[in-house]
Image (spheres, grey):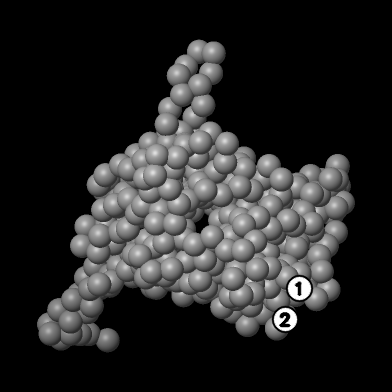
C-alpha cells in the first residue's frame, strides 16, 4: 500500500514523538527513576525504569558522586524534585584519619539526572538512616553516636519547599546542663534504623540491646517522649525494622540460623507496642541471615531479604514472602517458588510507583535484581527480558521516584 505525502509526514511525526517520549514498539516509556548507592567508590547509580518490561536503563551522567563518604541511605522528597543521601563516613584507622558523615542534597532534573546542591551535618556522628514525614516538610536523620558519646540520636531538619534546603529543628522538650535547648533527640544505644508508623509514631531499632525507642511526632517536626521510653523486644539479634499501617515488624537473625524469625507488633496509644496474636513467625525453611524487610505500598505483602541459607552446599541468597493478615499477623505465601532467588548479598528493596515491579540491590554481586510483582497475589517472578542489572560497586540502599510533579 502506498501512502500519500501527508500520510508519510504523519507517520514520521508519530515516530519522532514516540522517540521524544522514550517509547518504542518494545517499551512503554519511563515509569520511574531509580537511584542506587554504591559504597565502594561513593557513587550513585541512576536508572530509568521501562514501563513495559521493567528493565533498567542507565541515566545520562551516571554514576554520580554521593556528595560524601560511605553512602548507605537515601530518601526522595514527595514530588520527586529533591533527593537526600546519608553518607555514614568512615572511622579512623592506623593509616588514615576518620572521615565524618553528612547529608547530601540533590535536585532531580530531566530524566532523573541528579545535581548536587548542598551538604549538611547532623548533630551526632555516624549517621546511618533517614526518614521523611508524609508531607515532605521534615527530615529525620538517625545518628549512631549522639553528642554525649553514649547514646544514639535523631537530628530533625525542616525542608524548604522551594529549594529543598535543610534547617535544624531544636528539641523543645529537653535542655542540656547549661539550660539551653538540645539540638537533637536522644534514642537508645547504637541504633541502626528507624520507621514511621502512620504520621504519629517514630521508632528506632537499637542494636546494642535489641530494643526499640519510641517518639510521638507532633507539629513543627517535634518528637515527644512517651511513657515507655525504651521497649524491650524478644529479639536475640534484631537486624531490620519495617512498618505497615499500624503494625511494626522486626526481623530477628536469632542465636543460630535456624532461629531466624519475624516479630510482629501492633502500635497502640502513646506509641506503645503489643505482640500480635500468634506471636513470632518463623522465617521460611533453609533461609538464614535476614538483613532487611519490606512491605508493599498497599500493606498487603511482606518480604524478607536473606543473605544466606542453612544449606551449606547451597548458601544462596533469597527473598521470603508472607501475606499480611487483617490482624497484622504474617502467613507464609504458598507459592512453590517461595523463597525467591536473588543476587548475592541482598541489602535493600524498593517498589516502582505503578506497583508493577520490585527491585533488590545486592552488595556482593554488585547488581540490582528486578522482579515482576503480581498485584493481586504479591508473588514475584523474573522480568521477561533479563532480571539482573550491574550497579555501582558494593551497593547499599536504593530509592525510586515517579516523574517529578509540582
Image coordinates of residue 180 in percent, x first then y, are: 37, 45
Residue at 36 percent across and 40 percent down: it is 121
Q: Secondary structure at mark 1?
A: loop
- 158 is higher (above) or lower (below) than 2: above
Residue at 28 percent across and 71 percent down: it is 405
- Looking at this view, is 72 or 43 the one in front? 72
- How packed mark 2 is, by other alpha carbons closer than 10 Å (few <14, some 14-19, many 20 or more), is few
**The C terminus appears in which quarter of the rendering?**
bottom left
- Residue that mark 2 sits on: 327
Residue at 24 percent across and 67 percent down: it is 20
**The N terminus appears in which quarter of the rendering?**
bottom left
Image coordinates of residue 130 in percent, x first then y, are: 47, 53
- Residue that mark 1 sits on: 276
- How packed mark 1 is, by other alpha carbons closer than 10 Å (few <14, some 14-19, many 20 or more), is some
Residue 254 located left or right of residue 48: right
* Residue 179 appears anywhere in the view: yes
Counting labels gives 2
Image coordinates of residue 378 in percent, x first then y, are: 65, 75
- Looking at this view, is 304 or 7 the one in front? 304
CA gap, disc 2 to disc 1? 7 Å
Residue at 68 percent across and 64 percent down: it is 249
- 11 is higher (above) or lower (below) than 381: below
Residues at discs 2 and 1 in contact (Cβ within 8 Å): yes
Image coordinates of residue 85 in percent, x first then y, are: 40, 48
| Earlier-in-chain disc, 2 versus 1 | 1
Residue 314 located left or right of residue 191: right
Q: Quadrant of residue 30?
A: bottom left
Residue 226 located left or right of residue 15: right
Amino acid at each position: 500500500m502506498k501512502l500519500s505525502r501527508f500520510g508519510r509526514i504523519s507517520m514520521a511525526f508519530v515516530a519522532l514523538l514516540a522517540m521524544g517520549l522514550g517509547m518504542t514498539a518494545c517499551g512503554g516509556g519511563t515509569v520511574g527513576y531509580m537511584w542506587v548507592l554504591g559504597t565502594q567508590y561513593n557513587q550513585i547509580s541512576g536508572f530509568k525504569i521501562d514501563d513495559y518490561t521493567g528493565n533498567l536503563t542507565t541515566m545520562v551522567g551516571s554514576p554520580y558522586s554521593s556528595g560524601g563518604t560511605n553512602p548507605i541511605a537515601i530518601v526522595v522528597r514527595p514530588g520527586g524534585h529533591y533527593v537526600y543521601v546519608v553518607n555514614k563516613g568512615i572511622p579512623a584507622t592506623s593509616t588514615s584519619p576518620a572521615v565524618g558523615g553528612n547529608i547530601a542534597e540533590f535536585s532531580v532534573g530531566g530524566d532523573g539526572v541528579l545535581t548536587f546542591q548542598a551538604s549538611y551535618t547532623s548533630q551526632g556522628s555516624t549517621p546511618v538512616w533517614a526518614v521523611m514525614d508524609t508531607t515532605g516538610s521534615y527530615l529525620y536523620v538517625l545518628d549512631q553516636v549522639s553528642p554525649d558519646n553514649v547514646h544514639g540520636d535523631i537530628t530533625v531538619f525542616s525542608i524548604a519547599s522551594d529549594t529543598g534546603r535543610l534547617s535544624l529543628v531544636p528539641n523543645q522538650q529537653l535542655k542540656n546542663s547549661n539550660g539551653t535547648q538540645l539540638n537533637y533527640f536522644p534514642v537508645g544505644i547504637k541504633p541502626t534504623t528507624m520507621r514511621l508508623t502512620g504520621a504519629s509514631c517514630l521508632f528506632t531499632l537499637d542494636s546494642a540491646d535489641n530494643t526499640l525507642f519510641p517518639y510521638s511526632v507532633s507539629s513543627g517536626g517535634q518528637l515527644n517522649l512517651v511513657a515507655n521510653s525504651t521497649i524491650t523486644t524478644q529479639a536475640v539479634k534484631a537486624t531490620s525494622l519495617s512498618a505497615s499501617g499500624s503494625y511494626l515488624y522486626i526481623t530477628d537473625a536469632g542465636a543460630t540460623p535456624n532461629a531466624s524469625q519475624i516479630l510482629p507488633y501492633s502500635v497502640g496509644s502513646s506509641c506503645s507496642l503489643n505482640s500480635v496474636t500468634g506471636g513470632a513467625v518463623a522465617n521460611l525453611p533453609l533461609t538464614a541471615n535476614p538483613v532487611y524487610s519490606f512491605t508493599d505500598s498497599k500493606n498487603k505483602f511482606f518480604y524478607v531479604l536473606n543473605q544466606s541459607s542453612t544449606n551449606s552446599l547451597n548458601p544462596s541468597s533469597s527473598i521470603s514472602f508472607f501475606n499480611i493478615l487483617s490482624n497484622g499477623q504474617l502467613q507464609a505465601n504458598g507459592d512453590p517458588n517461595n523463597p525467591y532467588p536473588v543476587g548475592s548479598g541482598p541489602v535493600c528493596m524498593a517498589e516502582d510507583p505503578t506497583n508493577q515491579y520490585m527491585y533488590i540491590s545486592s552488595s556482593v554481586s554488585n547488581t540490582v535484581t528486578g522482579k515482576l510483582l503480581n498485584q493481586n497475589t504479591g508473588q514475584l517472578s523474573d522480568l521477561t527480558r533479563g532480571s539482573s542489572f550491574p550497579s555501582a560497586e558494593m551497593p547499599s540502599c536504593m530509592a525510586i521516584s515517579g516523574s517529578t510533579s509540582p
